[in-house]
Amino acid sequence: MKKLVSAGEILVEIMAERIGQSFLEPGPLVGPFPSGAPAIFIGQAAALGQPAGLVGAVGKDDFGQLNIDRLRTLGADVSAIAVHEGHATGTAFVTYRADASRHFVFNIRNSAAGLLDMDDAARRLLAGADHVHVMGSSLFSDRATDVALAAIVAVKARGGTVSFDPNIRREIMQASGMREALDQVLAQTDVFLPSGSELFLFSTASDEQGAVDDLLGRGVSCIVLKKGADGAAYHDRQGTVTMPGFAVEEVDPTGAGDCFGAAFVSFWLRAAAPAEALRIANACGALAVTRKGPMEGIHRLADVEAFIARAGASA
């Protein structure tokens, strides 16, 4: 099977317990949970049986160990995760608003994640990689962007492929150079995985089909538009495949898009039909929201298939 690699932030997430809670005053929190978009992605891919590894950096602390232990348990290659003494593992504090939106307070750039580097361990991991996945959130600094672009060059030089999830956070989008970095990655992308309105960040078209046609015309092989509870749509030059989502009770949406993307890319790498890849991806995204914590809803393939079978039986 093809090996999938990503590079980027590893952090812990600490969440407000109550909807409407603010960080402007004391309140109950829950966590820490292992997190970071590329870590969630690689964890879910590994859980589905895809060879997968992560280039990252954590502090020599409990939060870093929590993340490494979780990824290793899921079956991911953690050989390129650097551990830095004297630097803290990244953090994200999250509050939930009544309108279902979220507010984040990040410490990524100034944490151990900010020391992300293309070191010997990273080069060894990439030497065996067939595909690299890039998260927009991982382009949080010039240094991190350089690592992502170097990973793309290394994998493309070996005939490999690239997937890209913009994964834009308002709190991160303001970073200097972010827009240019996003465009550079898109220019090398084979599988593009935007969520909702992210599709229009990269096209001047005013409608979905126009934006899809624009991006496919610029060299993207396929576009998978994530639509949350409404499922997803796959577009390539041959046509479109849509797939409805699975009805579940949402507990925490964090990480659902990352789990969806990991599943779709894993099955795309296995040459699965778009409908099959979408079905597995939708199921992974649905299961992800049923647990509190970004990686707590990661499921192995047998459990995902059992969930799909139960959903089909009750339909």
Image: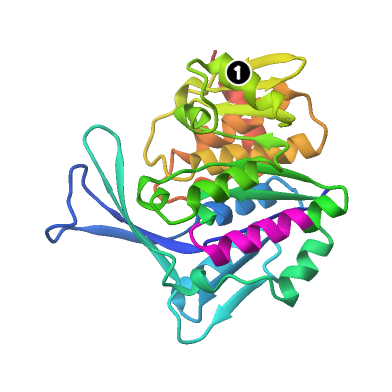
Q: Determine whether, in the image, residue 114 is placed left or right of residue 102.
A: right
At horizontal 46% and vertical 80% (from top left) the residue drawn is 61
Closest to the observer: 18 or 170? 170
The residue labelled by disc 1 is: 243
Q: Main secondary structure of the magenta part?
A: helix
Q: Examine the rendering and report whether any part of residue 307 can be seen.
A: no
Q: How many marks?
A: 1
In the image, is residue 145 part of the stretch drawn in magenta? yes
Q: Position of residue 308 (x, y in %)?
A: 62, 26
Closest to the observer: 68 or 150? 150
Q: Residue furthest bottom?
A: 86
At horizontal 43% and vertical 65% (from top left) the residue drawn is 108
Task: Write down the region rendered in magenta.
Answer: 140-153
Q: State the quadrant of the C terminus.
A: top right
Closest to the observer: 157 or 36? 157
Element at label 1: strand
Q: Determine whether, in the image, residue 217 is placed left or right of residue 225.
A: right
At horizontal 53% and vertical 35% (from top left) the residue drawn is 285
Q: Examine the rendering and report whether any part of residue 310 can be seen.
A: yes
Location of residue 79 (image quadrant):
bottom right
Q: Is residue 2 above or below residue 260?
A: below
* Amino acid at dot 1: Met
Q: Determine whether, in the image, residue 308 is placed left or right of residue 271.
A: left
At horizontal 48% and vertical 20% (from top left) the residue drawn is 230
Q: Residue furthest right?
A: 158
In the image, is residue 186 part of the stretch drawn in magenta? no
Closest to the observer: 312 or 272? 272
Location of residue 197 (image quadrant):
top left
Q: Position of residue 66 (x, y in %)?
A: 50, 69
Location of residue 307 (image quadrant):
top right
